[in-house]
Image (spheres, rainbow, N blue to C red):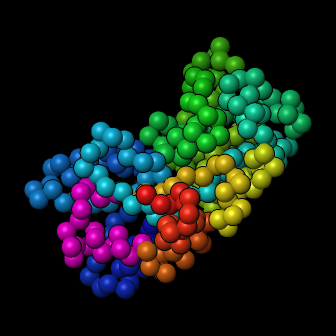
Amino acid sequence: MREIADRYEARCRGAEIDVAESGSLSGLGRLDKAGRSAPDGGPAFLAVSDVAAPSVYRKLEGRRVGVVLLGLVVHERTGVDNLTTEQLRGIYDGRYTNWKQLGGNDLPVSIVGRDAASGTRRAFETTVLRGSEPGTVSSYDCTGKDRDATARVTRCEVNSTGSLLDTVGRVPGAIGYAEVYAAAKHPRVIGIRLNGREPDIEWSGQRNYPFWTVEYLYTYGQPEDGSLAAKFRAFMDSDTAKNILRKYRNVPCADQSAAPGSVCHP
């Protein structure tokens, strides 16, 4: 989104767009608060979310802009490169506590999760675990059970993709989940196949891979015609924005909205 915003500013002199990171649900909450306090009900504020807005935010209106490919990541020393969904559920419910139980190296499993405000976590729970992420938070930094010594597995939570990848790269035996593009750029972190499949930017391949989510761009009500919010939202359908989405291994919804059965279709 920073890159798309920069390209818009370069094309439209005088436009200023600030981009701030947060969990998806935190961003939606900030947008709703800004909208309710705006004098005209139309703040110059947009929120990107990889989950649909909860029904409590009645005034938020979202457009589907892309499909985000997500993946499981592990520390490079785990010795595994593929896991099944059943094995993952066993890791997260504490049945597997050492990677040697899964054909990997003799290292204890450390789970690095996202906090409750994360849309990525919700996508993981919905598409992979098929239920809420189980287990208690037993660690403050994922290096040991310093928060709950009785827990079966070491588990911590972080509040951003960057923090998750930093932690997985720092802790041998760690596992987590993140956007595929971000994970590929991080040292000591490797992406693993899920049920033998890798994330695929091509629509036909991606549909056979379970871990992905739709990215939404939300406004508070309909932005005023001619406003920067309205113009930037329209810019998301441009070739420039679509090419940037593809660069980061996203599938632009502008290419898929008319396809029969497309998840991008409202």
In the image, is residue 170 above or below residue 258? above
The residue sitting at 29% across, 44% down in the picture is 57
Q: Residue at the front extreme?
A: 260
The front one of 163 and 115 is 115
Relative placement, left or right, of 82 versus 226 is right
Relative placement, left or right, of 45 versus 169 is left
| Residue stretch in magenta | 218-236
Query: Quarter of the image holding residue 172?
Result: top right
The x, y position of residue 151, in whole percent, is: 65, 18
Q: Residue at the top extreme?
A: 150
The residue sitting at 71% across, 23% down in the picture is 94
Residue 106 can be seen, yes or no: no
The front one of 164 and 117 is 117
Residue 198 can be seen, yes or no: yes
The x, y position of residue 26, in whole percent, is: 37, 45
The residue sitting at 23% across, 47% down in the picture is 33
The front one of 193 and 265 is 265
- Count all numbered tags in the image, as a single digit: 0
Which quarter of the figure is the C terminus placed in? Answer: bottom left
The x, y position of residue 186, in whole percent, is: 67, 57
Q: Residue at the left extreme?
A: 39
In the image, is residue 43 above or below residue 75? below
Which quarter of the figure is the N terminus placed in? Answer: bottom left
The x, y position of residue 39, in whole percent, is: 10, 56
Query: Quarter of the image holding residue 185?
Result: bottom right
The front one of 147 and 81 is 81
Relative placement, left or right, of 40 versus 45 is left
Specify whether residue 53 is painted magenta: no
The residue sitting at 60% across, 23% down in the picture is 135
